[in-house]
Image: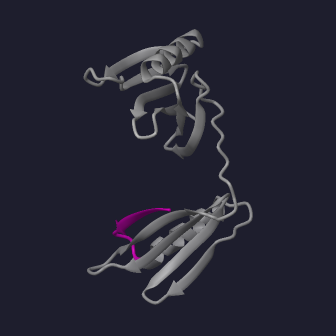
Amino acid sequence: MRVQSFESKASKEEVVAFYASHWRAGSADSQVAVTPAGADTLVGRPHGPFYLMAKVRAADGGGAQGTLSVSQVEGIAPRIDASGIPVPANGAQAVNVVESNDAGKRNKQVIWLTKGSSATVAAQYHSTLTRAGWALLQEQSAPASKETALVRMYSKDKRQLDVVIGVDTQRAVTVINTSLVTFGS
């Protein structure tokens, strides 16, 4: 479960109306529940294998405050669709995908895990990307250590691919965080 608190200058009623309307518009089946719960109002809806909820209350001095939460519904596996992002070598497995569309920019972030060393993974992924026409714009490496950690930014057409490669020493895996931003979509 992920929870984030918020504060708004809008009234409790306006915030509840916003989430109810926004979530209905984004749902083919319009399953949005608005439930009074004491001083709070709960706005919730299923979204694939997740349940989204806004808990809203009037704030002291005006406006509203509350929490936004996302929890996975038991028994429903999340869909991990890493399509559109070049797959790193060494049998990397996508373990998490987050997508958003904000102000004309579409973003897809994928976290990959692999057993290869970070230096080998970084070199192979760089080679794969440049052969596919991605241009390296920027690179930053962590101070010299046993395992390399680095950040690279690539560009191709109206897309930007940020790649962060590091090591999870406790699990002995290389972690690759890729973020693909498509502009003008």
Q: Main secondary structure of the magenta part?
A: strand
Q: Residue at x 69, y 62 (%)?
A: 75
- Which quarter of the image is occupied by the C terminus? top right
Side of 42 where 93 appears, left or right: right
Query: Which residues lie in the magenta part?
Result: 1-11
Residue 73, placed above or below residue 167: below
Instruction: Note whether residue 6 is visible.
Output: yes
Side of 136 where 143 appears, left or right: left
Q: Residue at x 49, y 65 (%)?
A: 69
Q: Residue at x 49, y 81 (%)?
A: 41
Residue 151, placed above or below residue 54: above
Side of 77 where 105 appears, left or right: left
Q: Is residue 133 magenta?
A: no
Instruction: Note whether residue 183 is visible.
Output: no
Quarter-of-image position of residue 95: top right
Q: Position of residue 129 (x, y in %)?
A: 54, 16
Outermost residue toward the bottom in this view: 38
